[in-house]
Image (cartoon, rainbow, N blue to C red):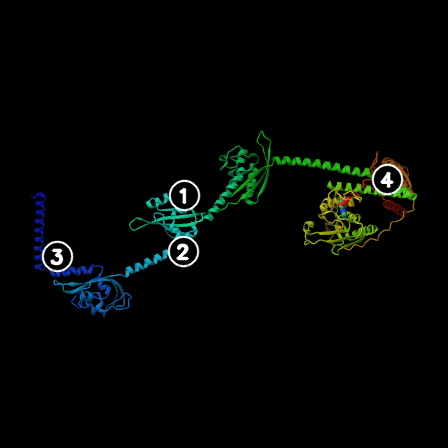
Amino acid sequence: MRDEGDASKDRRIEELEAKLTAYERCEEERRQSGRGWWGESYEEGVKLLQDIMEFIPQGLIIAKGPKANIQIISRNGRETIGLPLRDVLGRSRAGGLQTWGLLHTDGVTPVRAEDQPLARSIARGELVAEEEYVILRPDGGKVPIACNSGPIRDESGSITGGVLSWINVAKSQKLLEDLRESEARFKATFDQAAVGMAQTSPGNRFLRANAKYCQMLGYTFDELARISLDDIVLPEDRDKERLLVGQLLAGDISSISLEWRCLRKDGSIIWTEVTSSLVRKYSGEPDYIIHAKLDISVRKKAEEELFKSVQEYKALAENSPDLIIRINRGLRYLYVNPAFEAFSGHPASECIGKSIREACYLPEITEKIEEVVARVFSTHQAESLDFALRKPPEDARHFQASVVLESGQEGLEESVLILSRDITELKRLEAESKRAMEAAEQANRAKSEFLANMSHEIRTPMNGVMGMLDLALMNNPDPPVRSYLQMGKKSAGHLLNIVNDILDLARIEAGRIEIGTREFDVRMSLEALFRTMALEAEKKGLRFSAVIAADIPSRLIGDEGRLIQVFTNLIGNAIKFTTKGEITVKVTVARPTDIGMQEACPHTDAICMFASISDTGIGIPADQLEKIFESFAQVRGDLHLQHFGTGLGLPISRQLVELMDGKIWSESELGKGSTFYFTVTLQEAPNAQPETRPPRRKPQKPRQAPLTILLAEDNPINRLLAESLLEQRGHTVKAVENGQEAIEALAREPFDAVFMDVQMPVMSGEEATRRIRDGELPGVDAAIPVIALTAHALKGDRERFLAKGMDDYLAKPIDLEQLDQALERVAAKKESLQDR
Ligand code: ADP
């Protein structure tokens, strides 16, 4: 049973068959009438073909017959061949070879006629596709082509001709070359770029990276190829990185440019500046991301350090107790620190930008600041400023400020910094220390007075003791008594030395010793000392040798007495602590180059005298070599304690040497001997002349010419002593007890001289002398010689008394030789007056 569907199918088939039949009939009619689809006639067809030939952009030849006579050629073909139409049409390809040839792609070898594509298509029906040749034009030009060719057959299938078509590939070859060249250039730029360059896929895999990029991250490219972009990003930065890459791929942003930390292969971190952009395919799809990376670690580090130091300085200013403000040329606040805010009671926000007059928190000194700041801006010299500010109800606070210019670096405004330090407390301490110093000075003065008094008080009875012993000895006592008296005198001498040393040390320590700066003949005084010391050494059976090097200038400036004191102490010790052998003294100039001498000779422009005193004595244990320079220190041990001493000589020597800018030290070997070294700094006397020595005066015998002498002395023993000494010498003596009695006696009767004690009750010797010299005492000779006879025997006392009008000075205990010399001077003066 046929259904409805089958019927309609049959109908459609019938309709198709009818259409086919109609088409075949039409086609048959068209063929039989000789009409083409393009037109009504053959000429019209040829015309159409020629039109086509004029416009197609390729070379095209239609050839006929076995010889391939050219029937039609496109305009592009003619232009390629370089021949006009008339020279081409009707010619066979073979014939055409004489004027235009076909070469192989090497551009040299001709293609044989039978091998040419058209010839092969016509002769053998070959279809030639995409074969490349070079056309040789009559003008010698060569055009590379790619050609196709094929046969034309008639209805029976026989070949009647052929078609050759080609395109000029010169342009595409150039394009290809350009492309290759640009690719090479890109590769070179990419590989050798000074910045790191890399390409990553949209999936963040590394596609390419240059050497710099690899070196920056410490990976080889092969290693990079195995990891992803994520692996060189710090874990905490990965989310941000993915977000940015996502935005780049989505086209939300065109490129990324930022400073970014990168993780190197070794785990270290570098700062980089990265620029990434997306490259899309022709289709618009993301192709790859290109990254340019610069290592900015050094810059970042510098920035971080700068930031750190700025922070540090800021912290300093912010936490400084000093008031710090910065002011510009217009005297406007640029900065105030918290200390300033606290002091002024105004926050920075109220100050910044305002002038110091507007925000006048320093009213007392506004004008002064204006003046100083203006000067600092113009001179560029820092200045300091002292001022006081009062913040009622508090007391005024004292400040010391430095005003310094901050040179305006590029783009920065020039400004001055005012740093004010609160010195109120310092001032208070200063005042306190001044008061303390005054008190100390007062105490020191009191100490000096005490020393002077003590010296006086001890010397007065000592004078009595020693004088009386002298007197007793002068009376030629029997031998045992004489020896007792001599021992008594020796002991008294020791006692006096001890007193002298104690006083000396006390005065040095009180800073009351001044080192003299007088010119002296160092050779002469040292030689004299060494002669005396040699005698003492010889008394003990010791050899003594002393050498003063030739480089010691003869005249020097310094303290002769103190220098001799040091030598005396050290040589005295050497003799004291040596029982056999020798004492050697050497004096020379220390050169700055001498090892270890720099410290001992601090002044290069002066003479550094270097002395060594060696002995072959009992020596000093190493552990006590330093100690012996301390006051009252003596070496423990029987051998040492057998000798008399106080332990004051070395400390005094050390102090004196140090006062003379020198140093003292010792070396010793127990039982073998010791060497003491010291240096002192002395100045060479200008134009040092060898001194002509005055002939040494022989001690003279007391002159026989008797004098009439007034003696003023309150102490009865000393009075008796002085009286006896003077009378023994044949003089007439009148003794009184004080200054008052002395001037009264002088008014009553004439005298040749007055021996005047200084410290006396009722009227002191000084006062009495002043009155005598005033010339207002009737009957008193104002020019009478006055000889001070005093126990004030400290350094400077002599000068003090001479300045007070006395003519001469004798220290107690009285030295008989000095007494004789003083008497001699009085007698000489009397004589010269009588001679006139
Ligand atoms: P003093 O000799 O009066 O005791 P010093 O201060 O001059 O005082 O010397 C301190 C001590 O150093 C001496 O007591 C002695 O023990 C030791 N001394 C000093 N010079 C020598 C020396 N040349 N040889 C051995 N010992 C010495």
Distance Cα–Cα, label 3 vs label 2: 65 Å
Q: Can residue 324 be seen in this view?
A: yes
Distance Cα–Cα, label 4 vs label 1: 104 Å
Q: Is mark 1 within 8 Å of ligand 1?
A: no
Q: In this view, does 712 lie to the left or right of 93?
A: right
Q: Name the residue under label 2.
A: 192
Residue 465: assigned label: 4
For marks 1 and 2, the one nearer the N-term is 2
Q: Mark 1 points at which residue?
A: 237
Residue 79: assigned label: none
Q: From this view, report whether residue 131 is shown above or below residue 596.
A: below
Q: Is the N terminus in the top left, top right, bottom left or bottom right quadrant?
A: top left
For marks 3 and 2, the one nearer the N-term is 3
Label 4 vs label 3, nearer the camera: 4
State which quadrant residue 468 falls in.
top right
Report x, y in % for residue 635.
75, 44
State which quadrant residue 2 falls in.
top left
Q: In this view, does 552 lie to the left or right of 31?
A: right
Give the residue type that dot 3 points to: Trp
Label 3 vs label 1, nearer the camera: 1
Helix or strand or loop: what does disc 3 sit on?
A: loop
Distance Cα–Cα, label 1 vs label 2: 29 Å
Q: Furthest residue to the front?
A: 1
Give the residue type that dot 4 points to: Val
State which quadrant residue 631 falls in.
top right
Task: Pick the residue in front: 203 or 678.
Answer: 203
The residue drawn where x is 34% and y is 57% is 182
Q: Is residue 778 visible?
A: no
Helix or strand or loop: what does disc 2 sit on?
A: helix
Q: Is residue 641 left or right of residue 58?
A: right
Give the residue type that dot 1 points to: Asp
For marks 4 and 1, the one nearer the N-term is 1
